[in-house]
Amino acid sequence: MSVQMLMLGIIALPFAVGCLVFVVPRQGRLLVKALALLVSAAVLGMAGQLVRLLPPDSSLILDWHPSWGIAAWAGAPLLAVDALAGLMLVAAGFFAFLVAVYSVGFLKEEDVPSRRYYAYYLWVLAATCGALLSSNLILFIAFWGFAGIPLFLLVAMGKGEAAGKAAKKSLIILGATDSLLILGAAFLYMITRNWRMEAYGFSTLSADVFLICLCFTAAALAKAGAFPFHSWVPDAASSGPVPVAAYLPASLDKLLGVYFLVRIFHEFFEIDPLLRLAFMLIGVATVLGAVLLALAQHDMRKLLGFHAVSQVGYMVLGIASGSVIGLVGGLFHMLNNTLYKTILFLTGGAAEKHSGTGELEKMGGMSGVMPGTFFAALVGALAISGVPPLNGFFSKWLVYQGIIDFGGMKEAGGALWVLILVGAMFGSALTLASFVKVIFSVYLDRPAAAFNGPRPNLAMTVPSILLAVLCIVFGIAAVQIPIRYLVLPAVGVTEADFSPAGLWQPQYATLFLVVGLVLGAVIYGVSRIKIREDDAFLGGEYGPVANAWRFTGTEFYKTVSAEGVLKSWYKSAVKGSEDLYGASTGFALYLGQMLRFFHSGALPTYLAWCVLGAAALLAAFCLM
């Protein structure tokens, strides 16, 4: 298959099949699921073929131009793929296929209609691939914006009124920042007189370039789910169907947002150190703010949603640092995050389906019921917490070095980089504390009740275990496999330029850990012979009365929000003070009430406002 056919097919195939499955009769549910699996696998295969055909240090460009002349008018080729876009395409196809497999085993027709779900699912995949392949800014904006529509529809398929509210919030936040993207693109065209997405290298010390950079970065941060545009992520994760949380906030939207962020910081603009510092402060605020909110959550999917936000902070820190180590670490952390965050949503969904609840204190005992799911969840929890030798540790370690490299630059904000580094490391410790609660409450605690829900089938278990194995491999052989063959080519960095500091050797560390675990298991096995088991003695009670007491894994963590210096902050956060969406919608309603005074209902009045607005816009463009 030619390059042109691959580029067009990777977009057109999922879109066309999505339209097809939307009109398949209800009796064709199996056909719909089979088509979704085949198409997502085909997208993965075509993406891999594009990467295989990609010349070293070059890109593939679509030479075809439509007869209606838009490509000529826009002054740029429509589609192109380089190493960075190729990596993202393969990742998008890979996660789309795995989540499709999980969806087949998880979703019931009476809960989520298959035709609508898989149509929206494939449309999101088509829009994501289109945005990643776009070499024309107009086409990029079209695909980028279109991706928000099936996202809205997928989230709205959740149960209850909360799903509709979460879908509306997602659409408003992403739509508002998409408007900023359009505004920035218009200003960029006024400077360059073309719509090419290429390495301009404009300095942000210029006021107009600074404005364009802010507009573009706002859109990227919103798509990835970073502060202050983050609040749609936990709401969508907790209210929409479980596979949607794994598919969009955890994987595809992260890929797309971070992809654009890398383009902004390392191709479109030359970011000055003070602006980099500002974005790094946003990154560390994302890490700490989201992980503190996650620590106080007792709904599993809401907790995972806030952690999906917090991990974006590490990506922003690495990419904004301006160092090679930081860039590699930020991009590697993006890949790692999609691995373990998808694991956590998939395993959490399996546990929720079996127990019938997402409340941590009402769960428990899942490790014996679903050992494969427990293994995957444990690996995912340790990986996201940065525990060596898993992949999350290595990428965070690179991000920390990127922060240190930034601190060595002139005009880097004095000692602020030290606070940023400490904040990032503290966020990782809080993440571990949060997932101690999750693992104990869901898998190791005594069951809160007798659960009668379905146990995870192979379609729900295999994707999680496969991703868990990748987390282990990407940690132990981080430099040898993912960094050497995936990350470094994507950012155009050679191994000679990539020289992380320190003496961390994951292979030796893994060997020592395995030896320690084996010795511990042997000692535990021997010591069990000498242990005398007896009934519990608790609170002055003995026997059945003491056994009736159950202290859940969430009890200790309730003190985090109920006491201490953060008590008032948590109260204000619950009311939405940290939520830009809540504050902006309140202001918009207030402004609307004020503007009603000028809307009398008379046609001449409306015409006068239209004329005045057009005159103001014309004057503004004439002065530019």
Image (cartoon, helix red, strand yellow):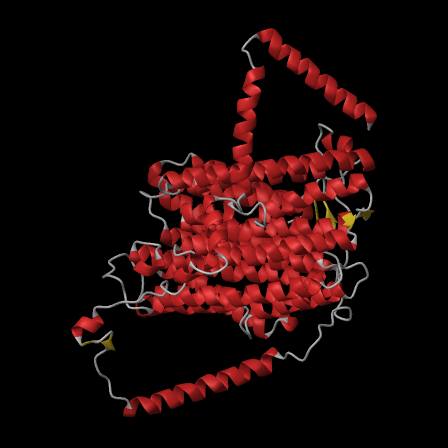
Q: Nearer the viewer, residue 174 or 52?
A: 174
Query: Which residue corresponds to the image point at 23% horizontal and 78% vertical from the top-left?
Result: 537
Residue 16 in the image, given as x and y percentages of width and height: 53, 38
Residue 501 in the image, given as x and y percentages of width and height: 71, 75
Residue 277 in the image, given as x and y percentages of width and height: 72, 55
The quarter of the picture where residue 156 lies is top left
Horizontal side of 210 relative to 44 (left or right) equals right
- Specify the farthest residue to the left: 544
Query: Which residue corresponds to the image point at 54% horizontal and 25% vertical from the top-left?
Result: 592
Query: Which residue corresponds to the image point at 76% horizontal and 20% vertical from the top-left?
Result: 618
Q: Quadrant of the C terminus?
A: top right
Vertical placement of residue 484 versus 519, above or below: above
Residue 526 in the image, given as x and y percentages of width and height: 34, 92
Q: Nearer the viewer, residue 360 or 465?
A: 360
Say if residue 549 shows up in the picture: yes
Vertical placement of residue 127 versus 416, above or below: above
Q: Nearer the viewer, residue 558 or 202?
A: 558
The quarter of the picture where residue 418 lies is bottom right
The quarter of the picture where residue 351 lies is bottom left
Say if residue 101 shows up in the picture: no
Query: Which residue corresponds to the image point at 31% horizontal and 70% vertical from the top-left?
Result: 368
Vertical placement of residue 424 versus 152, above or below: below
How many marks do you count on the picture?
Answer: 0
